[in-house]
Image: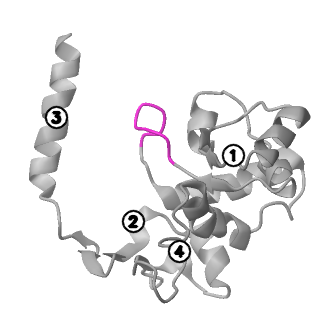
Amino acid sequence: LAAHMVHPTEEEMEILAENNVKIAHCPESNLKLASGVAPVPKMIEKGITVGIGTDGTASNDDLDIIGEISTAAKLHKGYNLDPTVLNARQALKMATIEGAKAIRKEDKLGSLEIGKNADIVLIDVEDPHLQPLFDPYTQIVYSSNGKDVDTVITNGEIKVLNKKVLVLDKDELIEKANYWKNKVLEK
């Protein structure tokens, strides 16, 4: 798995394709660091599997995968001056089945199929910014964000319900984050 790949040559992309190298595309990190724009449409055209990632908190402050999907879709349209590049369905696939392929877990993740983990994210589409609902793919990719996630089911277990995380103590998490922030600032 190769991360970012913002400046591969044509020859390097051929090598990546021949060797079945998968790519983790982290567009918001690349934008924040001004490191460049990965040629994702060309990579996909060459048969390279490209998934979407958020990178880390040092280079992506919100880690919102839904926002990352939206950024990827819009970035490549603007960069290529083509509104048809990386449509909503393609962008969503990069975060689901293509992402699963990128980490070589497509037999268990990335789509709802018998025998795969029951990993499901439900989005609350009742908020005004998601209305009117014409095409769920475009609404998810271009209009929603992480705050619209209502329910998360991982391997059949409910982790988030009614927008409330069930598996973490929010106050404890914030306390730990601040503890480590202060430890870093001490140095």
User: As shown in the figure, which amino acid type bears the numbered disc 4?
Assistant: His
Q: Is residue 22 above or below residue 152?
A: above
* Region rendered in magenta: 54-61
Q: Secondary structure at mark 1?
A: loop
- For label 1, the residue is 21
Residue 86 on image: x %, y % = 78, 61
- The CA distance from mark 1 to mark 2 is 33 Å
Nearest to viewer (mark 3 / mark 4): 3
Residue 31 on image: x %, y % = 63, 36
- Structural crowding at the residue carrying mark 4, measured as other residues with C-alpha within 10 Å and reported as few (<14), some (14–19) or many (≥20): few
Q: How many marks?
A: 4
Task: Pick whichever, 27 or 147, lies toward us.
Answer: 27
Q: Quadrant of the C terminus?
A: top left
User: As shown in the figure, which amino acid type bears the numbered disc 3?
Assistant: Asn
Q: Earlier in the sequence, mark 2 or mark 3?
A: 2
User: As shown in the figure, which amino acid type bears the numbered disc 2?
Assistant: Lys
- The CA distance from mark 4 to mark 1 is 38 Å
Q: Secondary structure at mark 2?
A: helix
Residue 147's disc number = 2
Magenta stretch mostly in which secondary structure?
A: loop
Q: Secondary structure at mark 3?
A: helix
- For label 4, the residue is 129
- The CA distance from mark 2 to mark 3 is 22 Å
Judge left or right: residue 185 versus residue 90: left
Kindly indicate whether the residue at mark 4 contacts the one at mark 3 (C-beta within 8 angstroms): no
Q: Residue 7's image quarter?
A: top right
Residue 86 counted in the magenta span: no
- For label 3, the residue is 178
- The CA distance from mark 3 to mark 4 is 33 Å
Task: Pick whichever, 160 or 5, lies toward us.
Answer: 5
Residue 75 on image: x %, y % = 73, 49
Q: Is residue 162 visible?
A: no
